[in-house]
Structure formats: structure tokens, C-alpha cells
Amino acid sequence: MHTKRIFSVAVALLFSASASQAQDIAITKEIINIGKQQYSPYLHQSYPNRVFWGDTHLHTTYSTDAGMIGNTLGPEEALRFARGEQVISSSGVPARLIKPLDFLVVSDHAENLGLSPMITESNPELLKDPWGKKIHDLVKAGKPWDAYKIWGEEGMAIGKDPMPNPALQRSAWERIINAVNKYNQPGVFTAFHGFEWTSSPDTKNLHRNVIFRDGADEARQVLPLSNFDTTDPEKLWDYLETYEKKTGGQALAIPHGGNLSNGRMFEVETMSGKPFDAAYAKRRMKWEPLYEVTQIKGDGEAHPSLSPNDEFADYYQWDKGDFGFNAKTPEMLPHEYARSALKIGLEQQKKLGINPFKFGMIGSTDSHTSLATTREDNFFGKFSGAEPGSKIRFDDVVVTDMRPNNHGEITIRHWESLASGLAGVWARENTREALWDAMARKEVYASTGTRLVVRVFAGWDFKPDEVYRPDFAPQGYQRGVPMGGDLSAAPKGGKPKFMVRALRDPDGANLDRIQIIKGWVDTDGKSHERIFDVAVSGGRKIGEDGRCKTPVGDTVDVANASYTNTIGDALLGGYWEDPTFDPKQGAFYYVRVLEIPTPSWIAYDEKIFAARAPKEALRKQQERAYTSPIWYTPGG
């Protein structure tokens, strides 16, 4: 067997939580029947058979940069909304999802966690602190933006806690834990304990979301780590390691927003300036198996200057600078985008023997409204001040150019925001354990907001017609590896063979095409990339170069914010063998699925509110999904 199998068939025994129940379901040899042929083929089925949708990055009023500037909704409202309930937004607008999410991580910023609600309630512990009272009094006097500016200048900008009080942080953390615990319903809806570590050295974005696999008992044994404690990711890993040793639980961290890191997210030196070594690479991939590749603050899959032969790479780039203090320069870009980072990872593996950037990909929102909305026709924005119908909906400043004598060259406004994204997770059960385990093994994918279903397997002996098999998934797991997996030890003369299926969102648009993006490293240690179309809709042809040059078409009526599914296909399947495969070269392969053109949230807003965004704003787009890669490593 030449592939590393992720799953094996196993017999699971169910044990009860109480003695009385155990007596009712006592296990007998007649029930187990090990080795005996039985009628039902699904008795011992163990592979993931469902995709679950969720958001691993949502902020509530407990995040100071949300609550201080208008968000009044707490964790309970965020969780109820994600479960499918109607809530009233901070600006008084009724809101509801088209269908519930399956899971949510309330990932409030650790820095002065819960400051805003404590100001609202005039918390006695807060008022004991002179700085806390100053901020409290400003907000109560109707000057929240003045208070927010002071918090930024006297806290976040210098990395120093202006109000170091563990009792306040403990109180806020306990409230969040209680809300998460209240709405977690195994099998129906999963609420994860988590937070955001907001590392911002020199205003560069190195943020991570921490997600615990465990319950309230374990989460209560720690306090969230903040930017005031450290800006070094290695210190975050120390924190996660300490958590696991202390509680017996498990945790992981998900980086995001590399496009605002000015080249630091995927640099090849540690924060102390030392080149990566094998130990660092191994440790990084243990604690950070995923990357949040798409969210409101732009898409981070690829960049047109890095991938000039990719006509779909120019998609909502935020490439002006960091958080307003430094402009972008070209040499920073390769260390900010996922595709180039995956290539750098292969180069590092050739040097170190271990790949430090062997990450899977997910999407999430980074919304600061408490509302995980990602559909273009239901987008509640980045901040509460820019919710639907607000006067500053388009012009609200998300990143302000703070350089001396600037002309706003690196300012970013809300009309440049992307209504993205979602995390698709392949698992068997909607529980913390099953979903977290899928994230840890990278069997996940990113969507820019719609719920299209994507599945890919790679192996050495798949046949072209097998993509149509009704047992497509069982065959894929038995004879190959899924997204996030590894291929090794290529048989003599063999090539990796891929089976891919994609199904449109039932409430969304038809599909344009399925692509496989390959990256590889040559014998000189230099990385390369190439795009292959493996399935296209509407009877179009794929050329000998592996590309379809004929566009899918366009039915978008921008003025009426509408489109039709008269082009594209609802279901696409593809079989592909790598024609450029060299068994001596390490490689990665990930799937990108594109939908047909549809209206953007700008077009919907302009129709509903008769408002006008700047002419540069995108009024139509092609939503997409990116799977976690499958890697090939020579020799194992």
C-alpha cells in the first residue's frame, strides 16, 4: 500500500454515562459479532460522511474594538443567531441566516476582554481602577470614540495593558464560557470555547484564533493569552502546551490576515531573527495546522503579481499596507498569501526536512457585529457602524493611513470588504471532538461565503470512471487520501490520480469550473506553480495545456442585483492525472472551485437602499472554495 491511510475500519463500543443506563445496554457477544458477515454495510462505517459549516472567528461586544464602537450584542446573541434564530442587530435591524450554522467559535479579543459590557454595567471592579474609571466616564458622557482612541494609544499601540486586572479578565472569560456551554448541543450545534490572541508587533497583523477541543471545566483552568503578555507566536505555543499538560485537553491556533502583516505572517525567520530549524517547523505545524485564507478583510489565497498566469487571482486583495503605519512593498507579498506560503514551505522542507507551512485552509468572518453573515444579500458588515442602511456603510474607514503627511494611500474603506467566509469541515458528528479532530487533521476547506460541497481524493490506482461511483467516498478513503492528507512512495511509473466532486449551494449559484492548483519544488530547491482545469460546465473544452479559455458567461443584472442559473452546472466531477509529475519532487495539490458570476453585496445595497458606492467597488464576482492541500513527499 503506497498511501498513508487516515482512517481504518474499527468496531466502536458505546458505553453509558450512568450505571442504570449501562444495565439497559449491556454489551454481549451476540451484539458485537466480530468477523461475522452482516446485512447492513454501514454498521462499522467510520469515515467522515458530512460537511459541517461554521465560523471560527466571530467577535461580540466583549471585544473592545467591537463593543466600544457600537456592538451591543454579546456571546448569547451571537450563538442564538448562528443557531438560526432571529436577532435584532446593534443598529436595530432584524437579522437571520438563510439556514443555521453547525458550529461557532466566539473568538473575542483577549486584550481587556469584556471592557465594553463592564462599562455599560458600571462594574465596581472596573471603577476601582483609575484608568478604567476614566474610560468608563468618557463612554457614559457620550464619547465612546474618545475612549476607544485612548485604549488604542495607551494599550494596543504600545503593547502594554493599561488596566492589568486578572479579576476583570476572569469575570469576562467566565461569562463567555457559560454562554458557550449553554448553547452547545452535541449532535445539533457545536459551540467552541476560544479567543483571539491579537499579536501586532509594530502594527503588523500576526493574529491567531485559539480553539479548545474541550469543555468548560478545562477552559476555566486558564485565562486567554493576550498581546499584552507576548507578541511572539512561540510564546503562544508555550501557552497551548501548558494548557494541554495542565488540563489533559487539546487546543490549536489558526493564523489569519496575513495580507496585513507586511510580509511577517510567512517569513522564514523566527521573531527573534533566527532562521527556521527543524524543531521550529515541527512545532509550528503541531500548533497551527490551519490558515484562515479568506475573511472580511480580503481574500488571501493568491495575488496577481505572484501568479500572473492565474486570471482568477485578482480577488479582493488588501495589499496597501499594515494597520495604517507602513505601506506595502513587493518583496512582502510572497510571505502573505497562502499559495506562495505553501510553495515557501516546500522550499523550507527541502532545506530542513520538515515543512513549516504545511497548513490546511478554512474561511471565517472576523465580523465584529456578533453576526456571522456571509451571503452577499445578507451581509451585516465588518463593524456595527457599517450595518445595512447606515450612512457610512460604504465609506466607513477600516484601516486609516496614519503616516505623516499622508494622502490616504493605504486607507481602506468598508466598500472594499468581502462578505466572507465560512469553514467547511468533513466529519461524522456535530460535536466538539469530531469537528476539532477534523480541523487538526486538515480535512477542511474554505468558502468565500456560500455552502458549496467539495470533496477530493488522491491515490495511485484510481480509474477515470470511478469519480461516478456511488461509493466514491468509501473508495477514496480505502485507496487514497482526502484533503489534508499525504501521498508518498510513488510506485514505479505511477502518477498521482485525483477524483474531485463539487455540488453547488442549494440556495446559491451554479458552478463554473473545478481547478487543481499544483505547487512543486525542483532539484535546485526553487518552487513553481501551475493551474489545471479538471472539470468545466456547459460543454466547454479543456485544451492540451490543461486550461479552458472560454468564460462560463454572465447573467448578472447589476441594476436589479439578480442573476439566473441558466449557465453553469449544479454538479461537477473530475478525474485528473498529473502530467508533470516527477517522483523526486515534493509537491502540493489543492482544489479551487469557482461559481458563475453573481452580484456582490455592493449591488444588493445599491438596489435596496438607492445608495451609490465608489465606481471602483465590485458589483459582481465569482464566489469560490479552496480545499486543504494534499501533499506528495518523495520517499515518505
Image (cartoon, helix red, strand yellow):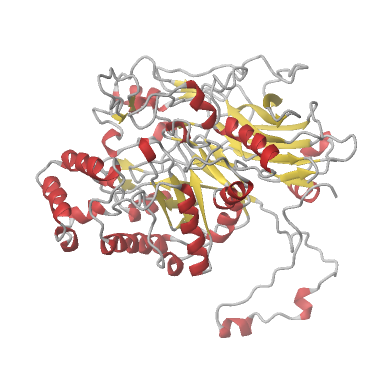
Residue extending furthest left? 141
Q: Quadrant of residue 579?
A: top right
Vertical placement of residue 599 versus 91, above or below: above
Q: Quadrant of residue 521?
A: top right
- Residue 516 seen in this snapshot: yes
Where residue 94 appears, x then y in whole percent?
A: 30, 42
Q: Residue at x 26, y 57 (%)?
A: 164
Q: Does residue 374 appear left or right of residue 576 in this picture?
A: left
Where residue 281 appears, x then y in whole percent?
A: 60, 46
Q: Residue at x 67, y 24 (%)?
A: 537
Q: Does residue 117 appear left or right of residue 60 in this picture?
A: left
Question: Total of numbered circles in the picture?
Answer: 0
Vertical placement of residue 121 versus 205, above or below: below
> Which is nearer the eye, 494 or 335?
335
Q: Residue at x 75, y 37 (%)?
A: 499
Vertical placement of residue 454 versus 612, above or below: below
Where residue 466 appears, x then y in whole percent?
A: 81, 39
Q: Quadrant of residue 559?
A: top left
- Residue 100 seen in this snapshot: no
Residue extending furthest right? 492
Where residue 414 appears, x then y in whole percent?
A: 34, 28
Q: Residue at x 56, y 45 (%)?
A: 290
> Which is nearer the eye, 373 or 117?
117
Q: Does residue 550 appear left or right of residue 466 in this picture?
A: left
Q: Does residue 425 appear left or right of residue 260 in this picture?
A: right
